Amino acid sequence: MASLLRAAATWGLFPWRGYCSRQGRLSEDFVETLKAIVGNPHVSTAAAVLQQHGHDESMHRCQPPDAVVWPQNVEQVSQLAALCYRQRVPIIPFGTGTGVEGGVCAVQGGVCINLTHMDQIRALNAQDFSVVVEPGVTHRALNTYLRDSGLWFPVDPGADASLCGMAATGASGTNAVRYGTVRDNVLNLEVVLPGGQLLHTAGQGRHFRKSAAGYNLTGLFVGSEGTLGLITAATLRLHPLPEGTVAATCAFPSVQAAVDTTVQILQAAVPVARIEFLDDVMIDACNRHSNLNCTVAPTLFLEFHGSEQALAEQLQRAEEITQCNGALHFSWAKEAEERKQLWAARHNAWYAALALRPGCKGYSTDVCVPISRLPEILVQTKKDLQASGLTGAMAGHVGDGNFHCILVVDMEDAEELRRAKAFGYQLGRRSQAPGANGREEHLADGLFSFPGGHWRSTGHAPGNMALGWASGSCCRRRWVPQARPGSSRPRWIPEAS
């Protein structure tokens, strides 16, 4: 055990050795070394715990890790990473497990590093509009902490996701149309690299809003999905709380009318904070699941921020545009409780859709296209969904040209699963036409393409991390080290099939 610890602390000096048994399980010595690093209570190999950490909210079957550890600080994370790196054991960072793409599945076993015990807000710089948070701090927890400061963090993916997990996956959400995605709101990251080295992407303690000096390492790690390192702290950009907030709903006679309204509101430069689309199936599901009383028709949920005068002007302009597109009604609410109920229903749309067929699994797709192409693609997708005979609903952040089809599928029905995958493939092909982008937040089958193969994507929590410079635990082909003459670092190559 002592030799393992020394090896972990002095990477680059020892030959590569694997401490996994031939059966694919971690050896007793390796598990004891994990306990020596984080303490016996913070390591588990219990079957129930492994099962809990082997899946997220997606349809993908559980693939548990071989052990789960809960580090208490960045020093322990560094030692764990160095140990696993030296012994060629896969690492799976785990946040809140709220993803819907199977990113936390341990496809080759390994060690799951649950970062939720690191839950401190290290520093709040109110005058600089920034805050430093650890991985265990969630979106809601931060905004609760900021409640009396007059500031908030607006990026809202719906689920109460880990903020560092959001950074790792490049999360977006309902407020992105006005405040940007998480990529636009991360100033600095503290990252433990695969070998255990600690990196501050913008420099230690820095929280500049802009810098033209050096490489944009922060941008490199945001959205890296756990493949480049473990994010152990994030410096985030905060925004002033709006003076006033109004939420509105508007039903339309057709999908075309709802999407045309979205485009026209944006073209008219109405500074809408949120603009979300839900089709008739999704509205019906949300009515049942969240006790709403909305008209069952294609609907837009909107939110406006600003002063009383600005809100009145925004509402007037938005209502005029909706009426020009044949809106069935336009209603709005200022009371916080009504607004909270409305957006809670939108954020719970995934679970509302699953409730349409109890016992079945959700199959999420994701398309992001230029606003100009949104009406065409969304309308055609609705027709394809109806023609497929599948149970599914549509919702999306249409202010960004982004929408999702949530299919509810019986995983035991091979024919239904085949049709669901065919639908996802067709949607992906359409979205890959010139000017479109087939991946934004979630993907139909949890895979996206790159030259030479397919890689798993992840959701709102960190995904599988590499043992080097490529993702060894989450790609379809296993990557193995090859010695390089004159260098202690190996070259990573695909294992021969």
Image (cartoon, rainbow, N blue to C red):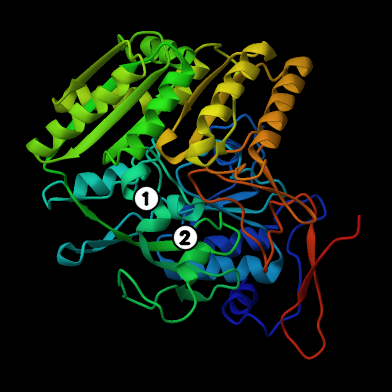
Q: Quadrant of the C terminus?
A: bottom right
Residue 94 appears left or right of 263: right
- Callout 1 environment at 10 Å: few (<14), some (14 to 19), or many (20+)? some
Residue 269: x and y in percent read 29, 41
Q: Amino acid at mark 1?
A: Gly
Q: Residue at x 48, y 13 (%)?
A: 281
Question: Does residue 182 appear to the left or right of 434 in the view shown?
Answer: left
Q: Badge 2 local density, few (<14 within 10 Å), some, or many (20+)?
A: some
Q: Are marks 2 and 1 in contact (CB under 8 Å)?
A: no
Q: Earlier in the sequence, mark 2 or mark 1?
A: 2
Q: Position of residue 362 (x, y in %)?
A: 58, 24
Q: Which residue is located at x 52 percent, y 51 percent? A: 462
* Quadrant of res 26: bottom right
In the displayed structure image, the side of residue 479 where residue 100 appears, left or right: left
Closer to the observer: label 2 or label 1? Answer: 1
Q: Of 163 and 1, which appears nearest the observer?
A: 163
The residue labelled by disc 2 is 39
Extreme-left residue of the structure: 308
Q: Which residue is mark 1?
A: 180
Dot 1: element = loop
Which is nearer the eye, 123 or 313? 313
Vertical position of residue 243 compared to residue 320: above or below = below
Give coordinates of residue 45: x percent, y percent. 60, 46
Give the image location of residue 364, x and y in percent. Answer: 58, 30
- Kindly report the distance in space between the C-alpha atoms of the residues bearing marks 2 and 1: 40 Å
Residue at the right extreme, as displayed: 497
Q: Residue at x 69, y 20 (%)?
A: 411
The reply to whether residue 348 is in sight is no
